[in-house]
Amino acid sequence: MSTEITMYTSEFARYIGQKVEHRVEQRIEQETLARVMLTLLATRFGELSPTVTEEVRRASVETLNAVTERFVKAETLEHAISPLRA
């Protein structure tokens, strides 16, 4: 019985480790996208307000990707960041 418990515990720990690793990778991706987007927005549209900066930092990867797509054609900051406020 002890061997079964040890095997179960080991498998469970491996599963949890994989989940944690996946979340860390997602978080790193999100933070990297946010930093890049903040740089691009500030370079193109000038200094960003604290509100916009915080919105970008809190945005999901999907939302940041949408902002990136808008950024390419946007003539104004408001148009570029509209996915943040949808």
Image (cartoon, helix red, strand yellow):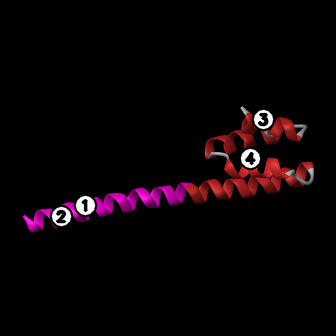
The percent coordinates of residue 53 (x first, y second) are 79, 52
Query: To which residue does mark 4 refer?
Result: 55
Q: For mark 1, does the 10 Å Cα neighbourhood hold few (<14), some (14 to 19), or many (20 or more) residues?
A: few
Magenta: main secondary structure: helix
| Label 3 or label 2, whichever comes before in sequence order | 2
Residue 22 x %, y %: 46, 56
Residue at the spot of label 2: 7
- Which residue lies at the image location 39% right of the left edge and 59% below the top edge? 18
Residue closest to the far right? 46
Residue 18: say if magenta: yes
Q: Amino acid at mark 1?
A: Glu
Q: Residues within 10 Å of mark 3 (few under 14, many from 20)?
A: some
The residue range painted magenta reads 1-26
The amino acid at mark 2 is Met
Q: Nearer the viewer, mark 4 or mark 3?
A: 4
Contact (CB < 8 A) between labels 1 and 3?
A: no
Residue contact at pointers 2 and 1, CB within 8 angstroms: yes
Return the residue nearer the eye: 44 or 5: 5
Residue 68 in picture, x, y percent from top left: 74, 44
Label whose residue precedes the other's in the sequence (1 or 3): 1
Residue at mark 1: 11
Whether residue 11 appears in magenta in the rendering, the answer is: yes
